Image: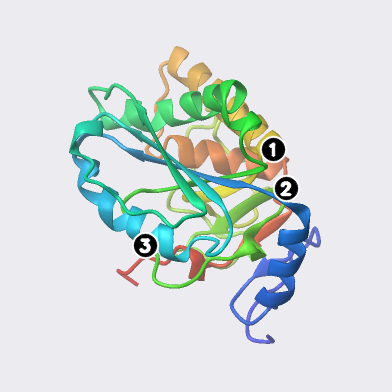
Amino acid sequence: RRDVLVLTPWLAPIVWEGTFSRDILDAQYLQKNLLTGVVTFAVEKYWFFIEGFMSSANKYFLAGHPVNFYLFTDSPEKISHLQMAPENHLVVIPVQDDPRWQDISRSRMDMLSSYIQSQFQHEVDYLYSMDINVQLLAHIGVEIIDALVATISSWQVTPRQHSKASETQPESQSAIPEGQGDFHYTASFYGGSVAEVYKLARACSAGLAQDRGNGLEGPWHHESRLNRYLVQHKPTRLLSPEYYWDPEL
């Protein structure tokens, strides 16, 4: 494709529809005997989205390949019976809700790093975090597999623009120094190898905790911290906004 940017300045591929052969990648993935996990959170009113997300992800996410879906929820009793593909497995992890959505947002990174260390690293090779309030409308395949993967925000598709979600408090651990940003990445879909996601989650959790200790609370919480981390640790693969498109656009 010549109509879009397909390579970053640090030579990481940007995956768009039409830039890869899924058949070739599927064959390579099968030879490696890999298992991929998906983490998603359904807390408080977000339990409403569980059935829509799970049914579409079960159909379209790495179809034909084994996937473990890890669902963190404070309402396990509200989950109806979900029919999973034979190769997929749903693991429900009960959690307590937090009184404020900001605390829910921050605690995601804490829980993610903790469960990677205690459980996920022993069960999957790659791990992706996705928001529960989405529906997959087309196949997302093994073209997303790489060490550290980020998705370009559909609201900001060109690099080095001022982001609406940038941290504006310079003393914050999430602040990006002037001129150092690349793309803006959504926290709604990211992942990679278990080892790299663990390092990301630990760093983001520590930065958010330090800000909290200093009385700082940015408007975008773990998304701002994720972007700060990815300035210092460049993604090895980027997914185009096609992978997480905002219907408002």
- First along the sequence among labels 3 and 1: 3
Q: Which residue matches tag 2?
A: 147
| 24 up-or-down from 38: above or below | below
Q: CA distance from mark 2 to mark 1?
A: 7 Å
Rendering coords of residue 74 (x, y %)? 26, 29
Tell which of 62 and 155 is nearer to you.
62
Mark 2 in CB contact with mark 1 (< 8 angstroms) = yes
Q: Residue at x 43, y 31 (%)?
A: 108
| 206 up-or-down from 92: above or below | above
Rendering coords of residue 150 (x, y %)? 60, 53
Res 64 → quadrant: bottom right
At label 2, the amino acid type is Ala
Q: CA distance from mark 2 to mark 3?
A: 25 Å
Q: Residue furthest front?
A: 86
Q: How many marks?
A: 3
* Location of the N terminus (image quadrant): bottom right
Numbered label attached to residue 196: 1
Q: Secondary structure at mark 3?
A: helix
At label 1, the amino acid type is Glu
Q: Secondary structure at mark 1?
A: helix
- First along the sequence among labels 2 and 1: 2
Residue 143, can we see it? yes
Numbered label attached to residue 56: 3
